[in-house]
Image (cartoon, rainbow, N blue to C red):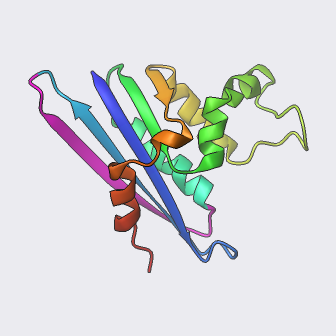
Amino acid sequence: MKVELFIQGKTKNPAIQKKAQARWCIRCALKNGTVESRDGVVILQNVTTKRAVLYALDQALQKFNKAAVIKIYISDDYVRAVFLNSWIGRWKNNDWHKIRLNGDIRHLDLWQQIAGKLSNHAVTFAKGDELENEVLQDMERRLNIG
């Protein structure tokens, strides 16, 4: 089964981290040619957008009950870079510590959960130029933080 997974995040008052919202959308192309979609919203208080995006990714991955070929589109540059640069593999090999800086990985609980869930699938991540996508743009419009 070929699947596209879209993750879009937004924060109201990011400087003071009041409320973060992330939206996920899964689109599956079925054998008969039709496309099915499922989506969800995550709203979290007093967290960063990155944590909301990771939480949304984790929730979306919970929807898969068998292995799939997944292309993931993530709006957050840092989260996308972690996957595109294979940092999770390095962190795992280094006992879940960064090699540089202070050694701590922020949101470690979610990174570990996501890494475990992704291991069941054949996954690719969209590069930056692929993110000018109508699905992500629609998700951005639908994010409503009040």
Q: Residue at x 52, y 50 (%)?
A: 75
Q: Is residue 39 left or right of residue 97?
A: left
**In the picture provided, is 146 more to the left or to the right than 53?**
left
Residue 5 x, y percent position in the rendering: 38, 39
Q: Residue at x 44, y 75 (%)?
A: 145
Question: Which quarter of the figure is the N terminus placed in?
Answer: top left
User: Which region is colored magenta?
Assistant: 32-48
Q: Quadrant of the C terminus?
A: bottom left
Above or below: residue 133 compared with residue 82:
below
Q: Image point 67% across, 26% down: which residue?
A: 86
Q: Is residue 63 above or below residue 15?
A: above
State whether residue 15 appears in this view.
Answer: yes
Examine the structure image and report whether residue 40 is included in the region drawn in magenta.
Answer: yes
Residue 129 horizontal/vertical position (percent): 51, 41
Front residue of 44/137: it is 137
| Extreme-left residue of the structure | 32
How many numbered discs? 0
Percent from the top left, x then y, of residue 55? 51, 49
- Residue at left 40%, top 44%? 6
Magenta stretch: includes residue 77: no
Q: Position of residue 98 (x, y in %)?
A: 82, 34
Residue 58, visible in the rendered structure? no
* Closest to the observer, 5 or 127: 127
Q: Which image quadrant for residue 84?
A: top right
In terms of secondary structure, what is the magenta stretch mainly?
A: strand
